[in-house]
Image: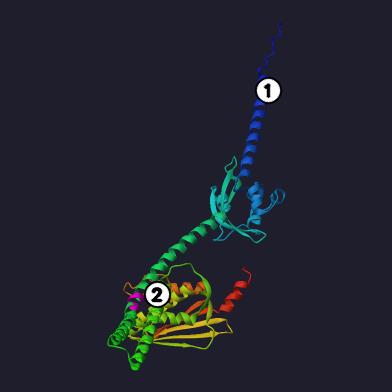
Amino acid sequence: MVRQPLDASPFQDIVSFGRQQNGQKEEIRIGLSIAQTLINRMSEGVMVLDPEYRIVWINDQALNLASLTRKEALGLYCYQVSHQAIAPCDSPETPCPMKKTLAQKVSAHAIHEHVHENGRARYCDVSTYPLLGADGQVVQVVEVQWDMTTELSERFERRTRALQEDLARVVQEDKLVALGKLVASVAHEINNPVSSIINFTKLILKGLREGPPTPEDLADFERYLDLTVREAERCGEIVTNLLTFSRQKSPEPGGVDMVEIVERTLVLMQHLMNLSGIKVVTRFEPADFSVWGDYNQLQQCLTNLLFNAVEAMGGGGTLTIRGQVKADKGLVCLDVSDTGCGISPEHVPHIFEPFFSTKSDTSGVGLGLAMVFDIVKSHGGDVLVRSRRGEGTTFRLLFPTRDRSAEQDKEPKR
């Protein structure tokens, strides 16, 4: 009997299969190593969680965000690390995306505020993705956290700058509307002293041409020249105030006397008050009315209030400006009262809203009182209003005194 040679192919297949397995294991190991390296190099934090919310794997970025070592993080619940909480997120403000992923086997997303042990809050874009087992059930969940705090801050700053620029343009438009009204009024007001200057000069010139002046003529000439100088100074003051009001420049905070602002603004508006049949009464107690702020903004604030009062007293009336200093509270109080038509109760809560107006004409862009509110608030003050339909309105402006503002500036910022 001849022995048949042994067939080695099954053994070769086993050896080949073993080699393939080893090669596949090596490929898997290399693939896992590459994946882990890439994930660790990601700017996003990545965690792998079991269905009980425990961390089974975490990358370096997530460890940095949580200020933990890998040994400390593994085995903790994700909500312990992210929210310093003892239970999963369960509120409308911070919905838990993992709950949806576990329940529906789909990816989910939410924006969370994460507060770390040092008290620093960070805003994270959180997304969760299901890892399904052979039976189709969720065995693990991958959570990816993108720290968007810096980008949000930059976007907020850019948006804030854009809004400030837009507001500055709109404010200037509103200011130009007020300036136009002032110019129309001041043009008539300046005309009177200019006419007086011309007449006095003509009288002096006529007297000199008639011959050598007598002592009586010289006395008259001196009186005429004195009146001319005073009228010219008045014109100069009006023009200076107009230029100051119209100038567009960055806020320059400093010590400001509110009484001086009232007096200068009334000089600009005196002719308009006369034409409108409005009597002006000012009452200031003897005190220091200095506040810390920007002169132009405060003058614009008062101008808007006075225009509002003039428009409310279409048939004439009395405008009263009272000032007092509440030293015990560190406040400068300025009341602007008119005897006009008043404000309906349903309108009072809305009068400081931008573009809100009860006027049917196009006398402005609807920013007068909104500007008053914004300027006063930016100076650390407050605006109160008291009005009754048919009986007039009083706006009360409250500003910190200059000394109180200085003390607040010295306090540490929290």
SS state under label 1: helix
Q: Which residues are magenta?
A: 182-186
Percent from the top left, x then y, of residue 273?
A: 36, 83
Could you say which quadrant of the image residue 113 lies in?
A: bottom right
**Residue at the far front in the pictured view:** 212
SS state under label 2: helix
Q: Is residue 184 magenta?
A: yes
Q: Determine whether, in the image, residue 105 is placed left or right of residue 353.
A: right
Label 1, label 2: how far apart the Cα atoms are: 100 Å
Percent from the top left, x then y, of residue 234?
A: 39, 81
319 vs 1: above or below: below
54 vs 189: above or below: above
- Residue position for label 2: 242
Between 267 and 375, the one nearer to me in the picture: 267
Percent from the top left, x then y, of residue 211?
A: 29, 88
Instruction: Identify residue type, mark 2.
Output: Leu
Residue 49 visible in this rendered orientation of the protein: no
Res. 15 mark: 1
Q: Residues within 10 Å of mark 1 (few under 14, many from 20)?
A: few
Q: Residues within 10 Å of mark 2 (few under 14, many from 20)?
A: some
Of labels 1 and 2, earlier in sequence is 1
Choose mark 1 or mark 2, whichever is in front.
2
**Residue at the far top in the pictured view:** 1
Q: Determine whether, in the image, residue 231 is placed left or right of residue 51.
A: left
Please name the residue shown 64% across and 40% down the image: 37
Instruction: Identify residue type, mark 1.
Output: Val
Percent from the top left, x then y, of residue 66?
A: 66, 54
